[in-house]
Amino acid sequence: MKKIIYISLIILSSGLISCSNFLTQEPILQQSDVLTLSDYDGLNDATAGAYTYLYSSNWYGNSFILAAEFRGGNAKIPTNTNFGSGRFQNDYAWNYTSTVTSALWNTAYYVISNANNVINSLEGKETDDVTTQDLDNLKAECLFLRAIAYFDLVRVYAQPYTSDPQSLGVPVVLVSELGKPARETVATVYERIVADLTEAESIIGGNYIRSDVDDPAAAVTKPAIQALLSRVYLYMGNWQKAAEYATAVINNPKFHLWTVANYVAQWGRNTADPSGEVIFEVYGSRRNYTWGNWDVIPWETNPNGYADAASSADLRDLYESGDIRGTMFVSHPDAPDHFWTTKYPGKPNTNQQENNTIVLRLSEMYLNRAEAIIRGNLSISGVSASGDLQTIANSRGATSQAATPTGVMIERRKELAFEGQIAFDLPRTGTSLTRVDYNGAEQNRNIPFPDKRWALPIPKSETDANENIVQNPL
């Protein structure tokens, strides 16, 4: 059977050999699960191995990000036939079926399986050289990875929590063993996500960063856990918690907003600026086991590459003169009316085949807090929604948006464009999709909310393998 939660413990053999290149080594496929999980070194390698799937072209390496931009109205298929490879046509037109849907399902459950197996194998592994804190750090990493996998799954394959928390979510699997689990409610999935993240926050070392990593921002840390909690609580409409966790990250002296002077240079770096905005990112490398070759974001957004994901004119029109973010688009002499994002320029000397994908950064925390204050009518000492929005605007050379629900959503669209958030921001706020610059099938130009289409079909291979999985309305 192809039931991904049936995957045996041997998957953990994809743990990586060297922590110094923990996202770039080839996987070990010769060890047994018993050997892999028998001591700290094996558990540590197995934890590192779980990160590799995040860079899959099904996830943060490509389609999870860009499909959201197409569905949300920021991206469009080029009308110039000399540009584009035909990818993302279905995402752009919302033309989904059980056999044409997001490929995230299997990849995310691979991470969940790996994380489960480490979490369930840590007990009693202390030695003279391995402390309880060492093991707790591994557990915290795996709890975070499991949580982000469930969070992304429930956002793709279910209706938003804020619409109907009792609607069907995804299966919650805590022990990777044979079985055919049914879908839990959205509320239950979110309860698991929050439980995993709050436990991870409570047990991880305050200054813990996986040792000898190439890019410290590509490993789980306490601020990364707190930032993800802020986002999760925002999606739940728990405004107080969303604001509290955003504030915890904002107040962390490790992070600072980029400025007009250094904003452009931050994209395409091999590693994150240690005193910049990046809280957590996925490390992109051709040596990664799940690297997608040319099927990567920098090639999809490169006018000299596949050029599938051009930007919509109404997105670009949001940026006023002087806003540094408005300069983050490039055209081509053969298509002067098309512009592609330069947030994924490719790392130096990689031929646009590698780029880190930023998942959590400081500017989002200001936006989360501003939105939470506005929607939750919160009163936070020394903080205001208008002040947070002004802080973002000042750092980008822009005029601040009004401290209203509409204003904060406009600022989110400008700030987080092409970072994979807009297709989820719309439904969680009960907002219909209205596309202005659109060249697809007219009947799919606009998608109302509520609508069954906001929950993508579960892959047919999954429903065929597990009769307990109820398919979303097609």
Image (cartoon, rainbow, N blue to C red):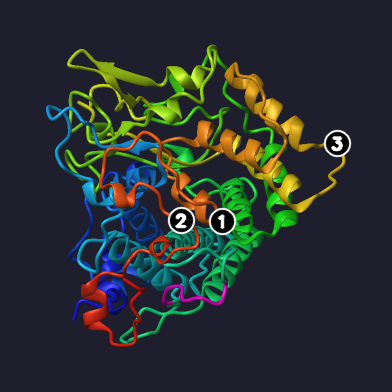
Residue 260: x and y in percent read 55, 15
Q: Which residue is painted at 46% across and 60% down in the image?
A: 155
461 and 336: which one is in front? 336
* Mark 1 nearby-residue class (10 Å; few <14, some 14–19, many ≥20): some
Q: CA distance from mark 3 to mark 1?
A: 30 Å
User: Tags 3 and 1 in contact by the CB under 8 Å rule?
Assistant: no
* Disc 2 and disc 1 in contact, CB within 8 angstroms: no
Q: Element under label 1?
A: loop
Pointer 2: what residue?
Answer: 448
Q: Amino acid at mark 3?
A: Gly
Which residue sits furthest left?
Answer: 82
Specify the label residue 234 is tagged with.
none
Q: Amino acid at mark 2?
A: Pro
Report the disc number at residue 430.
1
Gap in Å between the C-alphas at discs 2 and 1?
9 Å
Write down the region rendered in magenta.
Answer: 165-171
Task: Identify the residue under disc 3.
Answer: 382
Seen in the image, is 125 located left or right of residue 85? right
